[in-house]
Image (tube, rainbow, N blue to C red):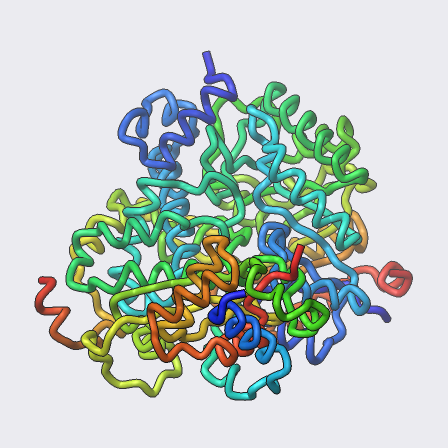
């Protein structure tokens, strides 16, 4: 069967991938690393003939009440036009305020007010790109007391109103559910399956926080057992989607990432033999 | 009355940026659900990540500075800079233009007077790497021009090129700071360094210029003609060999194609 | 044309036909290849920092002494600047 699972492409592996062109389902890049006309971007452009690409932005700040940064939006749009990737995504979060960029996926209150903001910003993004984008659930370390919607309710309504897709980060569900005392299976149960476009898988760390464990989304290890179990649940409930292994801290050898992707493919085959064959 | 989203984001931004004014607003903590892990502790996860991840981004842009001072010292240096100047936009490769000046003024680094120049070199390499290749001037492009017209030509440096001049031997210091280096010690009194940083096809690189070459390039970078630049170079270095220097710089693709 | 200008013109013209010297590239230091670190990622935190400790890492690191390759840099200018 064709491989469904791919990997997040990280700079330390770029030369090896360009040389060996290993088989994998998809390559995902972070948009913000390729906005300049560097030799790295030239290398990516040369890989387009061999791979399906996903452009994953981390800095559009779709949750900003102040709206989107027009300059950054234009640069991301130019990259998307250049690469014509199969998928484009960013997060349900914000990272810019008052002309300062925080380099973090900051949390939103899940309210009608915030929903209006995100629907408007995602609409503007989709208009600028001329295509659908997918929005990813973030890892959360806190919840706001005045939220009136759950995160999955918010995402479902966002997809309905904006027409965006949903990128389900399985590890982020595990992390958020643990940190906010939620049931991950329950989190996963009520999403509009037609809106789901991709899955992400990654590892997390466990930190001590006031004497209690807090899960930290560090993308620094192999996918953990809870995430594999929840991935299986998602596959059985919503079916197969393009799936990515992400690894950002203590980046290992490329073979380790490809091995995790192969493991994801085995999970896909065992959960949904027919769909996997069709994919 | 819950905080409206613009107010909430302003308060949250002030918190993660650790702003002196408004960095710990009580209404922000009150808006966050606390349990056995307090609202304040939960908020701190974000504040710590902002400081730490941006200092890690600076370490990736200024690897030679970090190699020289070590991770612990660099973290203090970088986090002091982050506290003063957060990025103005999301592309982290474009964050840190003001870092070399900050390094130069950083009191705990005073014993390393060459550190700011090393930061300038790291920054120039980073800028060169992310610059478009652009069209370069080749000897063949000039072959059709009558020789007597060549002196009045102005040629610009290629996209991403930069001149880094230091009173310290920063090329040797750079060498001694590489992970796989075999260099042992560098004598700071070994003299100054004039470096030309270039964007090449597959990487960024630097070369060492001699006194004539650097005067030639400084003049051209200021927009003078080749004739004026040649005069400047000859004044700086009486033995300046214009043919050899121009041929070398052309072969390095140091100039932009003529407009 | 002055003699100087004629000399410059012929030196520049001569440069165009000089064989590209292999040694011209010889002292070039390659610094940033395509494997140079990408800086933007979407990790939300790293385990080393993401503690919730009230102490910011900055406070003690600020006092630390440089400890790295700088130990290889020696010479009079160092002492005189102190």
Residue at 66 percent of width and 21 percent of height: A116
Q: Is residue A104 left or right of residue C82?
A: right
User: Which residue extends farthest top?
Assistant: B1
Q: Quadrant of the C terminus of chain A?
A: bottom right
User: Is residue B214 depicted above or below A183 in this figure?
Assistant: below
Which is more toward the observer, C42 or B75? B75
Residue at 50 percent of width and 46 percent of height: A178
User: Is residue A66 depicted above or below C31 in this figure?
Assistant: above
Residue at 17 percent of width and 55 percent of height: B108
Q: Is residue A203 visible?
A: no
Q: Is residue A2 left or right of residue C11?
A: right
| Residue B39, quarter of picture | top left
| Image spot of residue B54 (x, y percent) | 41, 50
User: Which residue extends farthest front?
Assistant: C2
Q: Is residue B69 left or right of residue B196?
A: left
Residue at 65 percent of width and 44 percent of height: A75
Q: How many marks?
A: 0
Q: Quadrant of the N terminus of chain A?
A: bottom right
Q: Is residue C41 visible?
A: yes
């Amino acid at each position: 069967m064709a491989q469904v699972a791919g990997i997040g492409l990280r700079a330390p592996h770029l030369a090896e991938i360009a040389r060996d062109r290993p088989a994998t389902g998809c390559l995902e890049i972070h948009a913000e690393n390729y906005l300049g006309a560097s030799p790295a971007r030239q290398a990516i452009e040369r890989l387009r003939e061999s791979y399906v690409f996903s452009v994953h932005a981390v800095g559009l700040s779709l949750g900003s009440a102040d709206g989107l940064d027009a300059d950054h939006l234009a640069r991301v749009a130019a990259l998307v036009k250049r690469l014509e990737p199969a998928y484009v995504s960013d997060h349900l979060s914000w990272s810019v305020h008052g002309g300062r960029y925080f380099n973090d996926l900051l949390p939103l209150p899940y309210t009608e007010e915030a929903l209006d903001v995100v629907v408007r910003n995602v609409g503007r993004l989709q208009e600028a790109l001329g295509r659908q984008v997918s929005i990813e659930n973030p890892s959360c370390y806190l919840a706001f007391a005045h939220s009136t919607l759950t995160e999955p309710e918010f995402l479902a309504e966002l997809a309905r109103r904006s027409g965006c897709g949903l990128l389900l980060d399985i590890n982020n569900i595990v992390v958020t559910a643990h940190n906010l005392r939620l049931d991950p299976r329950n989190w996963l149960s009520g999403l509009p399956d037609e809106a789901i476009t991709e899955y992400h898988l990654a590892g997390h760390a466990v930190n001590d926080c006031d004497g209690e464990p807090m899960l930290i989304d560090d993308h620094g290890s192999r996918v953990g057992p809870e995430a594999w179990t929840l991935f299986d649940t998602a596959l059985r409930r919503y079916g197969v989607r393009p799936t990515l292994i992400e690894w950002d801290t203590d980046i290992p050898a490329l073979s380790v990432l490809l091995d995790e992707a192969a493991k994801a493919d085995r999970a896909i085959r065992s959960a949904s033999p027919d769909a996997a064959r069709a994919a | 009355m819950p905080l409206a989203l613009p107010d909430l984001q302003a308060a949250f931004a002030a918190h993660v940026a650790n702003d002196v004014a408004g960095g710990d607003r009580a209404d922000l903590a009150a808006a966050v659900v606390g349990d056995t892990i307090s609202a304040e502790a939960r908020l701190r996860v974000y504040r710590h990540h902002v400081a730490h991840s941006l200092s890690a981004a600076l370490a990736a842009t200024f690897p030679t500075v970090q190699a020289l001072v070590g991770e612990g010292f660099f973290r203090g240096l970088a986090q002091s800079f982050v506290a003063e100047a957060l990025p103005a936009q999301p592309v982290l490769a474009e964050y840190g233009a003001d870092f070399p000046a900050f390094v130069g003024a950083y009191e705990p680094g005073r014993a390393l007077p060459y550190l700011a120049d090393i930061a300038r070199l790291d920054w120039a390499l980073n800028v060169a790497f992310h610059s478009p290749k652009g069209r370069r001037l080749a000897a063949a492009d000039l072959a059709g021009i009558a020789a007597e017209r060549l002196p009045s030509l102005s040629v610009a440096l290629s996209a991403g090129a930069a001149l880094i001049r230091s009173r310290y031997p920063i090329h040797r210091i750079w060498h001694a700071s590489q992970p796989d280096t075999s260099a042992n010690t560098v004598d700071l009194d070994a003299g100054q360094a004039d470096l030309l940083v270039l964007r090449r096809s597959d990487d960024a690189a630097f070369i060492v210029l001699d006194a004539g070459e650097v005067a030639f390039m400084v003049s051209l970078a200021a927009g003078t003609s080749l004739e004026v630049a040649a005069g400047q170079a000859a004044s700086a270095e009486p033995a300046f060999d214009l043919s050899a220097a121009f041929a070398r710089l052309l072969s390095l693709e140091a100039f932009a194609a003529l407009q | 044309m002055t003699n100087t200008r004629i000399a410059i013109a012929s030196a520049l013209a001569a440069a165009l036909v000089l064989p590209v010297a292999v040694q011209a590239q010889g002292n070039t230091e390659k610094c940033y290849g395509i494997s140079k670190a990408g800086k933007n990622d979407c990790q939300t935190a790293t385990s080393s920092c993401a503690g919730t400790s009230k102490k910011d890492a900055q406070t003690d690191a600020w006092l630390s002494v440089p400890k790295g390759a700088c130990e290889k840099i020696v010479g009079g200018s160092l002492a005189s600047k102190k």
